[in-house]
Every structure is written in structure tokens, then in C-alpha cells.
Amino acid sequence: MGIELREVSKTFELKNRRVEALKQTDLSIKDGEIFGLIGFSGAGKSTLLRLINLLERPTSGSVIVNGVVLDGLSEKELRARRQKIGMIFQQFNLIESKTVYENIEFVLKASKYDRSKMADRVNELLELVGLTDKKHSWPKNLSGGQKQRVGIARALANEPEVLLCDEATSALDPDTTKNILKLLKKINHDLGITIVLITHEMEVIKEVADRVGVMSDGEIIETNDVYSIFSHPQHDVTKGFVQDIYDFVIPSHIRETDSSQVITIKFLDENAEANYVNQLYRHFDLDISILNGRIEYINGMPLGFLMLHVQGDSGEIGNLRAFIAESKGIEEAEIYE
Ligand SMILES: Nc1ncnc2c1ncn2[C@@H]1O[C@H](COP(=O)(O)OP(=O)(O)O)[C@@H](O)[C@H]1O
Ligand SMILES: [Mg+2]
């Protein structure tokens, strides 16, 4: 189960040129996970997302959602399946002439929801997204975060199995973004809905995703769990996206020579840190001072950095580097400036 793209591609034929928005791609998204897709503008993220509910028809390949091959369906069958795939957008897409309540009700009416149960369902959705007190408000009187909550309630109205989020927090300030991401996490956890979320912000991925695909130029160039993407980015584009946490500046008074070197180490293991520096002091006949340190938590797992200034015999510094290379859960970090 989950979402499968098999050899899917999408080419747009324009008057004077063709755009390969998605080159031939295989992708598996597991049932119940939060999968993030990150990439610059124009990378093909929205196209990929729209292929999942067949708002775009693939040029080639197959889209399979929870075992159903979507590209084999008639328009009518597809419409029914699409109700099981909710979608939210950066621009919220609310109907301005309808209240919060009516915006949600509208979706249920369109899907021929049982009328006698409709009011209960709308109220239940309002409760879920924390908007019960805004029930009769108009969209123009809502904050961005509240508008997106209406968008989420609407997307969940028909009890979807999958929720697609296209830059859903890109129009929101950082605090509101955090709250909306928290709500998405809750929905994923409590309702077991698979979420595919696209963003150009690594912060969003770090906050909410289990796994991530990095897109560039119509291709998914790297896929991994979020911790591995941060701790061991492979592709240059990926390194660019995670560079904030690797961004240490070497103090200007420090001159690097054979006998004076800056070494930044990365801790992948919990609790290793304090004890490890003690070991370095004990084992090596070197002057070691700490220039900088930081710890990031990614899905609750620590990723630590420690920038050291090491002075002494260059051979002994080489021994220290070799020791670091052999230590479990510890690596010398490449600094991306
Ligand atoms: N309907 C369309 N017609 C023609 N070109 C399109 C269409 N949709 C997207 N594209 C092109 O496909 C590429 C990928 O776009 P998109 O999927 O929107 O990227 P992203 O969401 O990562 O910014 C871009 O070059 C874009 O101009
Ligand atoms: Mg887009």
C-alpha cells in the first residue's frame, strides 16, 4: 500500500518547446508516513504532486495509490478515487462568499454526503482543526493560519487516505508554520493519513517529515530518512539545502597551518559528546580548545557539532584525525560555506 510512481514522466508540449517537468521517476511512499519533497522553484515538485491525484496525466508510467492503478481508471472512477486524496495549497483557495462552515459543507455537498449527518461532520472537522469559534466567520476576517486550517478541514472532509500539501505553509510566518505543521503531524498520527508535503524550506522538512526526496531539474536526485539527509547529504543540491546547520565560521584570528588546525566533528550518537572531548584531551599531546558547538534535534535524534582548534605536532594532529575517523558515531564534518 502507499503511493507508487512507476517510471512516471511528464512532459509539457508548448508551442515552441517542450518542458520535461518530471523525467522518468520511480518513487515509493509508504502507507502512513509523512514524505517531504524539497527543491527550488521549477524543480517539478507541484507536477509530481499533481500526478499523484492525476490532476496531471503522466506522459508515461503508472501511478498507484493504495493498490489502485489510477491511470487505468475512467474519469468517473477517478473522481471517486480523488475524494480519497485531499489537497491543500499555499493560497488556501477558500470561497470568499462562504463562511468557514459553508466552505467545509460545500465539499461534503459536492461529494453527495449524507445530508442528515452533514452538520455533525462539519462540526467534527471544525473541532479537529481548532476552529469551532470561527464557524460563522468570513474568510477575509481570518488570519493566514486560520485560513489554512479551513483548507485542511475541507481536504479531510471525505476521510481521505492521502493528503497532498503544496507549499501549504509558504505564505505563513514561522510561528504559524509551526502550528500548522503540528496539526499535520497530529492528523498523520491520529488518523493514519499518508501525507506528501512539498516545500522549498528545509526547516519544514526537519519539523515534520519522516523521509524526504530532493528534487532538481525534474528529477528526484536523493531520497532518504530526514536524519540521514541532514547528517550525510550526498548531492551538492542537498548539501545546499542543509548547509545552515553546517554553517560554522572560523574565527578570523585563527590562522590554519600544519601545526594549527580547525577540526569540526559531527556526533551521530547520543551522550557521546562530553566524554569524547575528554578522551581527546587524554589521548593526545595537543592543545585543544573549543571554538563552537551546536546540537540539532531531528525527529528527536541529536545531531551534534563541535568545532575545535587543535595545536601541536602535525603528526599528532594526524593521529587525532585518524582516531576520529575510527570512532563509532563520530565523524569529521565537512563545512559548507
Ligand atoms: N501546465 C504547464 N504547462 C507548461 N509548463 C508547465 C506546466 N506546469 C509546470 N510547467 C513547467 O514545469 C516545470 C516544473 O514546474 P513545477 O512542477 O510547478 O515546479 P515546482 O513546483 O518545483 O516549482 C517548470 O519549468 C514549469 O514551468
Ligand atoms: Mg510548485
Image: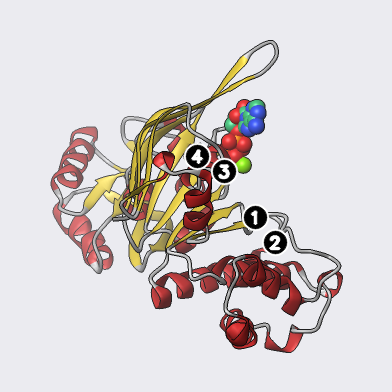
The residue that disc 2 covers is 172
- The circle drawn on residue 89 is 1
Give percent across and percent down for residue 332: 28, 43
Q: CA distance from mark 3 to mark 1?
A: 14 Å
Earlier along the polypeptide chain: callout 4 or callout 3?
Answer: 4
Q: Is mark 4 within 8 Å of ligand 1?
A: yes
- Residue at left 14%, top 54%? 283
- Residue at left 22%, top 57%? 281
- Per the image, label 4 sits on a secondary structure element best described as helix
Q: Amino acid at mark 1?
A: Phe
The residue that disc 4 covers is 48
- Per the image, label 1 sits on a secondary structure element best described as strand
Q: Nearer the viewer, mark 3 or mark 1?
A: 3
Give percent across and percent down for residue 48: 50, 39
Q: Residues within 10 Å of mark 1 (few under 14, many from 20)?
A: some
- Per the image, label 2 sits on a secondary structure element best described as loop
Name the side, left or right, on which 102 lies relative to 198: right
Q: CA distance from mark 2 to mark 3?
A: 25 Å
Q: CA distance from mark 4 to mark 3?
A: 10 Å
- Residue at left 52%, top 72%? 182
Q: Nearer the viewer, mark 4 or mark 3?
A: 3
Q: Amino acid at mark 2?
A: Leu
Q: CA distance from mark 4 to mark 2?
A: 23 Å
Is residue 285 visible from the viewing direction of this image? yes
Q: CA distance from mark 1 to mark 4?
A: 14 Å
Q: Amino acid at mark 4?
A: Leu
